[in-house]
Image (cartoon, rainbow, N blue to C red):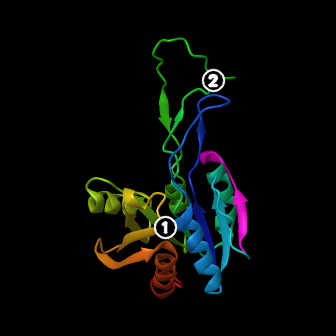
Amino acid sequence: MRILITAGPTREYLDDVRYLSNASSGQMGYALARSAIAAGHEVALVSGPVTINPPAGCEIYQVETTDEMFAQCEKLFPNCDGVIGTAAVCDYRIKTRKPGKIAKTGEAITLELIETIDVLAELGTQKGSRWVMGFALESQDARFNAVRKLYSKKCDAIVLNSVSAIGSSENFVEVIDQSQEIVATYSGEKTQVADSLIDWIQQHLAGS
């Protein structure tokens, strides 16, 4: 298979210096890329800003903003068999980016934020015969919100993990498929979890 994987955070600039982002390290996405390559698959990795070296044999596409990530994924997806969306895409951007650097005035300021494009949901609408696996990082009503995302993003399966996964070398995940049931659970080092997820994809999504 040829697999598209998104990883890491995106950044949305408020001005030419400051930006909104999150603490995603990209470890899970990069681990999945390594596992997929080790299993004999081709990988196109679209990554936000991280400090991890991509695995050997991986096509790497470095992006920064959410729009850049979507544009790159939209180009690559038609020639892939499926996508694993692990990227922690920044959900909001400033409505009007300020030129230069916003100066301190000693007063409170108000920023008007609007939602960014939902990269995985957009790919889901374009999937055709391709498969889509999403990731949901939830802190409240976790399974309910994961199932909601499963359908809103037109995923074939979604991987639920918690906030504790951010920046950690370990993870505990639950795989939820279209039945809305948990069909697999994996825990341990992210490299081990990645191996298990690639194996699950090979058994349940490849060729679907």
Considering the numbered disc 1 on the image, is that residue within a helix, a strand or a loop? loop
Which region shows up in magenta?
57-67
Q: Residues within 10 Å of mark 2 (few under 14, many from 20)?
A: some
Could you tell whether 124 is left or right of 64 in the image? left
Query: Can residue 205 be seen?
Result: no
Does 1 sit above or below residue 28? below
Q: Amino acid at mark 1?
A: Ser
Q: Residue at x 56, y 52 (%)?
A: 9
Q: Nearer the viewer, residue 207 or 139?
A: 139
Q: Do the numbered discs 1 and 2 sit on residues whose CB atoms are within 8 Å?
A: no
Residue 113 part of the magenta segment? no
Query: Can residue 24 be seen?
Result: yes
- Calculate the distance from the C-alpha at mark 1 to the C-alpha at mark 2: 37 Å
Q: Residue at x 63, y 55 (%)?
A: 50
Could you tell whether 6 is left or right of 91 in the image? right
Quadrant of the image containing the N terminus: bottom right
Residue 62 part of the magenta segment? yes
| Residue 25 screen position, x and y as percent | 55, 57
Could you tell whether 15 is left or right of 171 in the image? right
Label located before the other in sequence (1 or 2): 2
Q: Residues within 10 Å of mark 1 (few under 14, many from 20)?
A: few
**Which residue in the protein does label 2 denote?**
98
- Choose top left, top right, bottom left or bottom right for residue 18: top right
Q: Amino acid at mark 2?
A: Lys
| Residue 114 screen position, x and y as percent | 49, 34
| Residue 161 screen position, x and y as percent | 38, 64
| Residue 179 screen position, x and y as percent | 30, 75
Q: Nearer the viewer, residue 180 or 192?
A: 192
**Which residue in the protein does label 1 denote?**
169
Q: Residue at x 62, y 69 (%)?
A: 4
- Choose top left, top right, bottom left or bottom right for residue 55: bottom right
